[in-house]
Each structure stands twice: as structure tokens, then as C-alpha cells.
Amino acid sequence: MAEIPEHLLKRAQEAKARATSEGDTSSTEATATESKIPEELLERTAAAGSKPSAVATKDASEEITSPQPPPASATGPAGHTQRLLAVVKSGSIQDVKLKPVDKVHVWPHLLIVEFVAALAVTAFCVVFSIFVNAPLLELANFNQTPNPSKAPWYFLGLQELLTMFHPMVAGVTIPGLALFLLILAPYIDKNPSNKPEDRKFAISLMTVHLMFWAVLVMIGSFFRGPGFNFIFPWADGLFFEL
């Protein structure tokens, strides 16, 4: 407990003394007033003996004998009336609890995992390149076009679309619509859950995109032969190079 200033204690004692003296004066006046009540009225009151009147008399006497508040002269700084109750330290009445947050910092929780994964992939690529030879093809002969002439495997899906649709549709419209739909996906599916069973729309959309492109790449890689004609690899051979 903090110490109470002396000037506040002094003012509180003075106010208490004034209230006590005024209370005694009021009780004396009330007794004198009661003594001046005519005997006829006292007899009627005793004969009636009604409870409401007794309650009213009791309330009136309490109102008369109740101590009056201290005068306006007992004011504190800047003319404000002060009533001292207690001084309590702020730490004892504040109950601050931290709310649990389901989040972690990027460093070190995320970056360390990503760094270790990058090191593992780099080590695997180095070891793989040591033991597996990946020779280049011979120099290109501009007088002889390879047959079939295929794009790299990651563009074979687009090349396969060109065999089915007009170049404007296969090269611009279909890929553009697919990318635009992927851009709108976060705004369509606003579910914050990261559980697969709660994200059926997002998972279905991504699965359709992957399967569509994977099927086109597989057809262009293994089922296209000379002249980019459709073949069966187990019958006509495999025309595919990385």
C-alpha cells in the first residue's frame, strides 16, 4: 500500500469531526422538535397504531438525524471535493493474459527447413550428375529437320493442343482462360482451412488442371511419331528425347 499524504488525512479528520458535530446538533434539534408535538396528536398516533405511519415516522426521524455531508469548504486542489477511499497499486488490479496465437515466426522455423531442403536437393543433383552421363546431341544440321520435331517436354502439351485447335484458340484462348481461372480461385474459395477435406473446390480445380496438362504432355511425348502422327509406342517405337 502506498502512503496516504498527510494533508489528505488532515482534511478527512476535519470533515469527520464536522459531520459528527452536525449530527449531534441535528439529533438535539430533533429531540426538541419531538417534545413540542401536542399531546393530542401523540394520543391519536398511539391509538391508530398503523404500520405505515410508524414507518413514515421512522423515515422522517432518520431523515432528520442523518449526518449532513461536509461543507463545500472542504475541497481539494483546484476546488474539487475529494473523498479518500484507498490507494491501490495498479499491478494488483490488472490481470493481463496472453492470448494463444497459432502462428510461428519465419525465422528460424521456416527458413531453416527451406535451407536444409535446398542443401539436400543440391547434394542430390551433384551426386546424380557425377554418376549419370547426360551427353549433348550432335551439332544441328539445318539441311535436315528431325522427324518428328517436338518441343521440350514441358511445352508438349501446348504443341498437342495445336494439333487439335486453331493456333489462336490453342495458344492464347485456352491457356489464358486456364490462368485466369487459377487467378480467380483464391477469391472464389475463401475457406481459410488447410485441411484437404475442407478444400474440395480448390483441390478439384487444381487436380483438373494438372490432369489435363499431364495427359497432353504424355500424348505428345509417347504417342506421337514421325510427322507428329498418333502411334502406339509398344508397336511403332518410342520417339521421345529429353
Image (cartoon, helix red, strand yellow):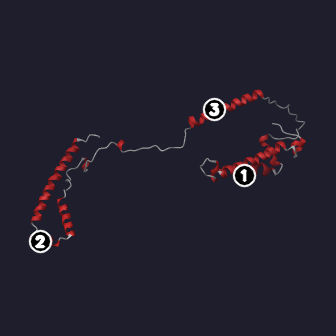
> What label does residue 116 carry, if any?
3
Across and down, in percent, residue 7 comes to 21, 43
Q: Residue at x 10, y 72 (%)?
A: 40
Name the residue furthest top. Answer: 130
Circle 2 Cα neighbour tier, 10 Å, few/some/many (<14 / 14–19 / ≥20): few
Residue at which label 1 appears: 177
Where does the C terminus fall, quadrant-wise? top right
Q: Is residue 211 left or right of residue 228?
A: left
Q: Earlier in the sequence, mark 3 or mark 2?
A: 2
Q: Residue at x 89, y 44 (%)?
A: 227
Of helix, strand and loop, which one carries label 1?
A: helix
Q: Which amino acid type is shown beneath numbered disc 3?
A: Val
Nearest to viewer (mark 3 / mark 1): 3
Residue 107 lies in quadrant: top right
Of helix, strand and loop, which one carries label 2?
A: helix
Q: Of residues 112 and 157, which is closer to you in this image? A: 112
Residue 180 in sight in this render? no
> What label does residue 43 carry, if any?
2
Q: Which amino acid type is shown beneath numbered disc 1?
A: Leu
Across and down, in percent, residue 231 comes to 88, 45
Q: Earlier in the sequence, mark 2 or mark 1?
A: 2
Q: Of residues 71 and 191, which is closer to you in this image? A: 191
Q: Residue at x 14, y 53 (%)?
A: 21
Q: Is residue 118 above or below residue 167?
A: above
Circle 1 Cα neighbour tier, 10 Å, few/some/many (<14 / 14–19 / ≥20): few
Q: Separation of disc 3 and disc 1 at Cα?
A: 37 Å
